[in-house]
Image (cartoon, rainbow, N blue to C red):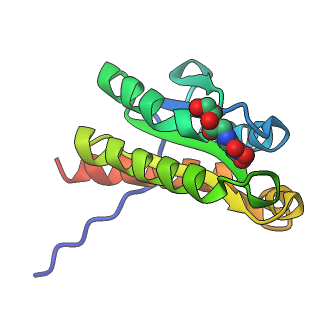
Amino acid sequence: MVKSFEGNLIGKNKTFGIVVSRFNSFITKKLLEGAQDCLIRHGIKDDDIDVFWVPGACELPITAMRVAKNTKHNGIICLGAVIRGETPHFDYVSSESAKGISEVGLTTGIPTIYGVITTDTLEQAIDRAGARGGNKGAEAALAALEMVNLFDKMK
Ligand code: INI
């Protein structure tokens, strides 16, 4: 018989670290609100969420790695906003943060979720931070919950 494994979205007794970039904080604060709200509505206690602020998306990976090494958290959510209209090194910042965040998950085994908005314009970023395009922070929190629960089932 085929065995199928899937994570549910139950947050009870789980702890999460959220690493969030201060760059474009007008957007990232909305992502953080979305992520926290989503975690709390899925049963995670306030005290079981730690938030770590960093200067920009480039600092997300190293900080996520530090959080992962503390092993206190079941999952890590990285939040940032890279907007092409405002930076000539958009490609560098977005690809380095994506690669780095993925590496944290691969090397530590702790679900480390990429919740970085990469857009051409500020308007697109606003759309994805709680307006028409939903909230990428809440989506990242859901992915983190699912992965943590999936890994529990795989033990
Ligand atoms: N960091 C971001 O999070 N988003 C950006 O759009 C951005 N731009 O435009 O450059 C950005 N740059 C800062 C970078 O992440 C580092 O904090 C900085 O280079 C110091 O290491």
User: Horizontal placement of 138 versus 25: left or right?
Assistant: left
Specify the farthest residue to the bottom: 1
Q: Is residue 147 above or below residue 112?
A: below
Specify the farthest residue to the front: 88
Picture coordinates of residue 53 (x, y %)?
63, 24
Q: Quadrant of residue 120?
A: bottom right
Task: Look at the image and tell me whether residue 40 can be seen.
Answer: no
Q: Is residue 57 above or below residue 102?
A: above
Question: What residue lies at 57% left-to-right and 26% top-to-bottom?
Answer: 45
Task: Look at the image and tell me whether residue 4 can be seen.
Answer: yes
Q: Quadrant of residue 24?
A: top right
Q: 109 or 8, which lies in front?
A: 109
Picture coordinates of residue 80 (x, y %)?
65, 44
Question: What residue lies at 32% left-to-right and 40% top-to-bottom?
Answer: 110
Quadrant location of the N terminus? bottom left
Question: What residue lies at 79% left-to-right and 67% top-to-bottom?
Answer: 133
Q: 147 or 113, which lies in front?
A: 113
Question: What residue lies at 80% left-to-right and 58% top-to-bottom?
Answer: 125
Picture coordinates of residue 60 (x, y %)?
52, 36
User: Horizontal placement of 140 versus 125: left or right?
Assistant: left
Give the quadrant of ligand 1.
top right
Picture coordinates of residue 52 (x, y %)?
58, 23
Q: 119 or 74, which lies in front?
A: 119
